[in-house]
Image: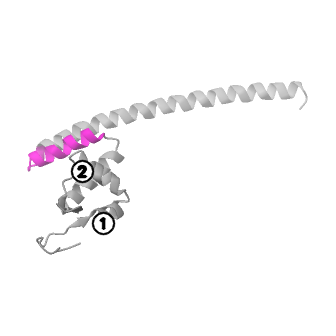
Amino acid sequence: MEGQPGLNHETWYTINDLSAAFDITARTLRHYEDVGMLAPLRRGSQRLYRERDRVRLQLILRGRRLGFSLPEIHDMLDLYDADPSEVTQLQDVIKRGDAKLAELQEQVDELQTTIQELLELRAKMQHRLDIILTQEGL
């Protein structure tokens, strides 16, 4: 939706535009608005999103996909708004990313241990089953 009457020549998006573009529900968009992560222009009951909102939404969804909580994402977005040089935000995102990587590596290690335990247990059970079947002549 470009150049709406009464609006500048900036590109504007409706809630339906962004919902379709990012394959999310309008309810999700309204939630991000309710928690202060998006700030669309209101024209009556219609919400009009700027390019800035579209980029923020993209960052929110990426953050969610990477396992960050909404408060963490909100903090990162606030840093971006507060520091146009992006230095503080980049340092913070790197720090949070490193912590997330360490957390995920710990989960991977725990999963590998669990997989190994299950494989060992399965091998013992299969061995026991083979013995029983051999003894019974099956």
Residue at the spot x=26%, y=52% of the render? 59
Q: Residue 121, image x and y in percent?
A: 64, 26
Magenta extent? 69-87
Residue 67 sits inside the magenta stretch? no
Give the camera-side residue of 55 and 43. 43
Q: What sort of colour scheme is used for the picture?
A: one colour
**What residue sits right under mark 1 in the picture?**
17
Residue 76 sits inside the magenta stretch? yes
Q: Residue 33, image x and y in percent?
A: 24, 50
Q: Which mark is residue 33?
A: 2
Q: In which quadrant will I find the N terminus?
A: bottom left
Can you say whether 5 is above or below 122 in the image? below
Give the camera-side residue of 127 and 64. 64
Q: Residue 20, image x and y in percent?
A: 35, 64
Kind of residue at disc 2: Glu
Q: Tell me the CA gap for discs 2 and 1.
A: 16 Å
